[in-house]
Amino acid sequence: EMTFKRYHRYSDMLRYLDYLSLKYPELVEMLTIGKSSLGQPLKVIKISTGQLTKNGEVKPAVWIDGGMHAREWISPAVVMYTLKQLVENFRVNRRVVEGADWYILPVSNPDGYEYSHTIDRFWRKTRSNHESQDLESSRTLTSFLWGETCRGVDMNRNWDFHWGEVGASDDPCQETYAGPRPFSEPETKAISDFIMDRKDRIKLYLTMHAYSQMWLIPWGYTNKKAGDYDDLMSMGKKAVDALNRVSGTLYQLGPAPSLLYPTSGGADDWAKGAAGIKYAYTVELRDDGTYGFLLPASQIVPTGKETFAAIKAIAKAIVCKN
Ligand code: 0X9
Ligand code: ZN
């Protein structure tokens, strides 16, 4: 019902989610957690074999999102692959599926994702418009630019934790525009509300990006080490080791400022610093820059396989303690 031979449009992905919830009603639940700026539904799939463990304790939960940046097509594809493994390959993955409730959002920025498929392959931001209606409707060059290039906010600069401090722009026409205020975007607002409501149960937060093959740990906004740096690193190592064992693909592990660059208002920092989720990671998927954002669809399955092994390993280590 879902091939991984090509990159799919948002509506195709939603159709697969519908199919899963119809075919596996005892395991899968669809939750609409909000709407994008252009009115598209933000759909989270909850995979659960029951909220309580055999001992009657409330199970931990895992959150995974993809597609925060529109042009990083491999991200939603890998999240969909993960979803398929957890649900349709339940028997093989039983331990991790039963060990936690899984909340999976394949495309957190559907407006941007569709824009990247139809108009501008390299679009990164959302498609909101924070300019006045006035300017938008007048037929000037300025308003034309506003209506096109200067739309949207970088969702990964829009979270309410050290918002706008470093590596973010206050210029709406820039790729890293942080927005007029934290959580100005309905997408980041909806996700953060949903996570906050479940923050004590969510033990692992993963946000999938591309590219550069890195498993990034907080903090992104500062060079200072997180308080539990050692734990973040040792769990992260389980992930990148498992990934490497599948395919030989090498991933670097460490904080964003030392491996990439510092940025603030990121989702991972918010998950850890504001929601208090101890294990929060940004995963930069394939490749190393050979194809970059234009990663051929023939790499969806290999990227999915290795990444699922990593997710399974880190989830097991965090939620299946016994
Ligand atoms: O810049 C980003 O948002 C991420 N890289 S990407 O190429 N996918 O745009 C890295 C974010 C790492 N996390 C933080 N800096 N908090
Ligand atoms: Zn990204």
Image: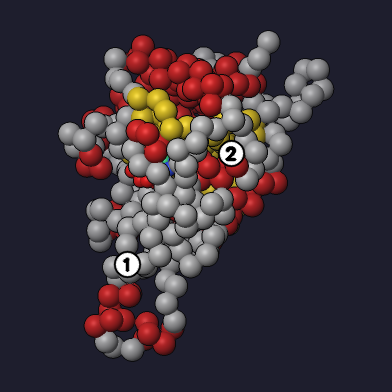
| Residue 184 shows in this picture | yes
Q: 47 and 289: which one is in front?
A: 289
Q: Is residue 13 left or right of residue 211?
A: right
Residue occupying image coordinates x 42% and y 15%: 242
Residue 6 found in image quarter = top left
Give me the residue at 35% from left, 33% from top: 259
Residue 220 numbered mark, or none: none
Whether residue 183 is situated above or below residue 43 in the rendered picture: below
x then y, percent, for residue 18:
52, 44
> Which quadrant of the rendered structure holds the N terminus?
top left
Type of amino acid under label 1: Cys
Q: Quadrant of ligand 1?
A: top left
The image position of residue 176, as x and y in percent, is: 36, 56
Outermost residue toward the right in this view: 56
Circle 2 Cα neighbour tier, 10 Å, few/some/many (<14 / 14–19 / ≥20)? many
- For the point 63% across and 45% down, the residue is 274
Q: List the residue tagged with mark 2.
A: 272
Q: What secondary structure is marked by label 1?
A: loop
In the figure, 218 relative to 317: above or below?
Answer: below
Report the front residue among 297 and 295. 295
Which kind of residue does numbered mark 2 sit on? Lys
Q: Which residue is mark 1?
A: 173
Q: CA distance from mark 1 to mark 2?
A: 29 Å
- Using a 10 Å C-alpha cutoff, classify the residue at mark 1 as few (fewer than 14 neighbours), some (14 to 19) or many (20 or more): some
**Residue at the farthest front position:** 224
